[in-house]
Amino acid sequence: MARQRERSWPRSLWLEHAFIPAILGGVGYALIFLYYNGYLPQPFFYEPAGTFMDWFSLAYWARHVGAFDVEGAIYPPISFLVLRLIGDDRCYLLDGVEPRACDWHSLVAIGVIYVVDVILTAVIFFKLDRRTALPRAIAVAVGLPMLYAVERGNLVTLCFAFLMLAYGPLLRSARLRWLCAGIAVNFKVYLIAGILAPLLKRRWLAVEGALVSVVAVYGLTWWLFGSGSPIEIYDNIRQFSSSFVAGGPLDLWYPSSYNTAIALLRGTNFPITAIIGSRPADLGVLFLELFTNFNRLAIMAAALAIWLRPEVVPLHRVVFFGIAFALMTSEAGGYTEILLLPFVFMETWRGIARPAALLLAYVLCIPMEIVVASLPSGVVRESYLGGREVIAFYGVGLMSLLRPGLIQLISTLLAAATLHDVWRDVRVQGWRQRWRFRRDMVILPGVLRPVMPSGDVATPNSERQ
């Protein structure tokens, strides 16, 4: 009887596996919709002619002068260098040539990068927990954030691979982890928050090594590409942030934060008050700002708790907090969720907050939209995937409005779990005979703790979870 109970699945496994048909069903629906209508449905990108254009627009500037001073790029040089090495130069130097019809090397590269991400995701989750590996790997590998990034041809898919190597369970070499972390930050600058977050766990050496890697990778790629100085990138990021306005409802298509919604409700560049009135718009701004600030405060409270009891909180959650806080502050696009959700799926099904966060993460991976109001008529568009003109129909998507809130709610749930774990550890262990601050300044000679193979600093057995 006991052996039979061990073989039976707990309720948590049934719940997680129940999302597999929902996610795969959403993928199947999108493919069927594409076959009959010639373009992908919501929530995929609203411009059917723009498939893979994140890749090819950068590839053009990778081969022409002015990526930083004319185009105002906010990406470090490594992105342009990679695209220059992969693609076919002839497809970008001739007038009247459509790069997507010519540069088949880049199209193959987009597919290969995605296949590598799928394999890497499967191996990582299989190594973490075999029982939950299948639903969690499917959610990350074929869920909406990943498929949206592939459809856009965004280099976040390549950044994803290096981020998982840096903080996943595959690499044992600390130096290789640092190198992967440095490459990931050079692809997406806001990931620097994830690199610095382990300071809360006193992982001085790991953070120092990753920062050195960031600088080394940047310096090398800047020298090889020939442009993209720190001053240029800083000025472009500052101008991009200061000039950000919501041009219309389509900017709400798939956001990563509520910054776009707040800008739209303020009517900076779109007469929203003429449609819904000034009072609902003001109340909407107030609610979204309070909601976002509350979630930021929750992360800050969790950060303080981690600092007090660093051994209680796993590293993947600390990295998640750093990246989540950065994405709440800026608008980087909804596909950036693929840099957050794997760390959520590394959580165990324990307590109340962690299971709730896992279920919300599965919901975010379902590649479908709930259209609550459709426009009365379609719009004629040219479709790249369909290879013809199509009549595209648009509507107001409920999930587009809820997805940023769900990410922030996941952050708050994990913050609550962190506060609970730290409070329980304080209640049980107390404050006496605490070793965590002993020999804490690892950079001082003579008081170094032994360095583990992972690049972390060894801790006494009493501090380990």
Image (tube, helix red, strand yellow):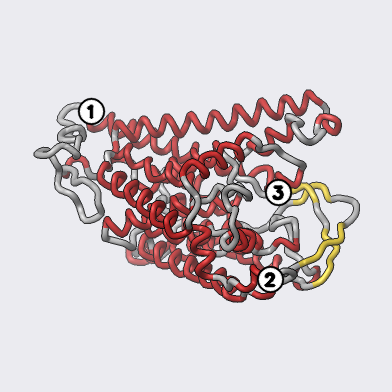
Q: Which residue is mark 3?
A: 253
- Quarter-of-image position of residue 36: bottom right
Q: Amino acid at mark 1?
A: Gly
Q: Position of residue 82 (x, y in %)?
A: 49, 64
Q: Which residue is mark 1?
A: 430
Relative to 103, 198 lies left or right = left
Of labels 3 and 1, the one closer to you: 3
Q: Are marks 3 and 1 in contact (CB under 8 Å)?
A: no
From this view, report whether residue 246 is shown above or below residue 278. Answer: below
Of labels 3 and 2, the one closer to you: 2
Q: Residues within 10 Å of mark 3 (few under 14, many from 20)?
A: many
Q: Which residue is mark 2?
A: 94
Q: Position of residue 443 (x, y in %)?
A: 19, 39
State the CA–CA distance, disc 2 to disc 1.
71 Å
Q: Amino acid at mark 3?
A: Trp
Of labels 2 and 1, the one closer to you: 2
